[in-house]
Image (spheres, rainbow, N blue to C red):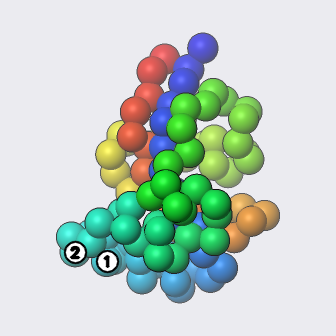
Amino acid sequence: MAKATARHILVDTEEQCQTLKEEIENGADFAALAQQHSSCPSGQQGGDLGEFGPGMMVKEFDEVVFSADVNTVQGPVQTQFGFHLLEVTSRSD
């Protein structure tokens, strides 16, 4: 069964999500931005969500986590919770 580890930043607006993505692309630290801006409790751990399998997260999240390139920031991804930047840190099939 596939497993992945990922981290994310959860914010309220697509615009804020895009701004943070640009900051990361320009060299900002993902974990530091997660601590400063993420509304998810995982933000205090730099956005780290730990290891999980398919179906353990919301559908929109799963689709990205189990298809995107590893160590590449994805998003904005909209879910019922808000807008996410996602980075898959590892994945095994």
Q: Residues within 10 Å of mark 2 (few under 14, many from 20)?
A: few
Residue 51 in percent (x, y) is at 55, 32
Kindly identify which numbered label has been placed on residue 23. Answer: 1
Going 67% across and 51% down the picture, which residue do you hit? 60
Q: Using the rendered view, name the quadrant where residue 12 is placed.
A: bottom right
Label 2 – label 1 distance at C-alpha: 5 Å
Label 2 belongs to which residue? 26
Of 29 and 67, nearer the camera is 29
Instruction: Evaluate whether residue 12 shows in this view.
Output: yes
Give residue 29's position: percent from left, percent from top. Answer: 29, 66
Q: Residues within 10 Å of mark 1 (few under 14, many from 20)?
A: some
Callout 2 amino acid:
Asn
In contact (CB < 8 Å): disc 2 and disc 1: yes
In the orientation shown, which residue stands out farthest toward the right? 80
Residue at the image point whose x is 70% and y is 42% from the top: 57
Q: Which mark is residue 77?
A: none
